[in-house]
Image (spheres, rainbow, N blue to C red):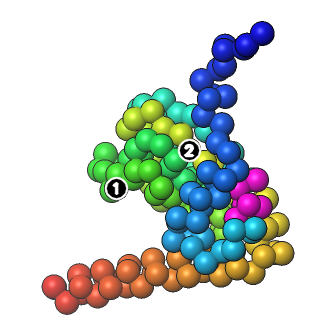
Amino acid sequence: MSTHTHHRLDETRLLLIEKVLLLKSLSIFAETPENVLAEVAEILEEEDRAAGELIFNDGEVAHCMYIIFKGEVRIHKDGHTLAVLKENDFFGELSLLDTETRSASASTNTETLLLKIDQEPFYEIMESRVEVARGIIKTLCKRLRAQNQKSLQVQAAK
């Protein structure tokens, strides 16, 4: 007897290998070995979101990062769109390291499948896997440099 009455969510369950390949494509995990990525993939939670849904609000306490597997997410603040993120983009990575409040809101533009990494299990992986911590640090340094460049350009333009 065949059971073709899957819930939509079951159909979007990702295979471990798909999650590993996705993680590998992210700058944050570029130098992390695959066996370690498999550990990170184990803690990913899939979240199916409808179009026009609020993922989190500006000022909310944050303790997870999101990766977009499918769909489009808008990062916005005070009615202004700051960025539109698509497949394989990630956001909220700072909150993996530090439980701070969100600096902007995030909403789905389309039906979206998100992969969520929570801070607690991620810390456990970082403690035993130095490559993971190193990858995060590199990504954040790049970000800071880019920010510094921007503020220098703004200073120079004045």
Image-based side of 132 in relation to 28, left or right? right
Q: Position of residue 17 (x, y in %)?
A: 67, 53
Image-based side of 53 in relation to 123, left or right? left
- According to the picture, the residue beneath numbered tag 2 turns out to be 114
Element at badge 2?
Answer: strand
Q: Are there few (<14), some (14-19), or many (20+) residues within 10 Å of tag 1?
A: few
Q: Is residue 100 visible?
A: no
Q: Position of residue 49 (x, y in %)?
A: 53, 33
Q: Tell me: residue 103, above or below residue 33.
A: above
Q: Residue at (31%, 45%) from the top-left corner?
A: 79
| Magenta extent | 37-42
The prevailing secondary structure element of the residues shown in magenta is helix
Q: Residue at (66%, 19%) from the top-left corner?
A: 6
Image-based side of 124 in relation to 52, left or right? right
Give the foreground label among 1 and 2: 2
Q: Is residue 112 magenta?
A: no
Image-based side of 140 in relation to 74, left or right? right
Give me the C-alpha separation between circle 1 and circle 2.
17 Å
User: Of the residues shown, which amino acid type is indicated by label 1?
Assistant: Ala
- According to the picture, the residue beneath numbered tag 1 turns out to be 83
Q: Position of residue 74 (x, y in %)?
A: 38, 47
Q: Residue at (67%, 28%) from the top-left corner?
A: 10
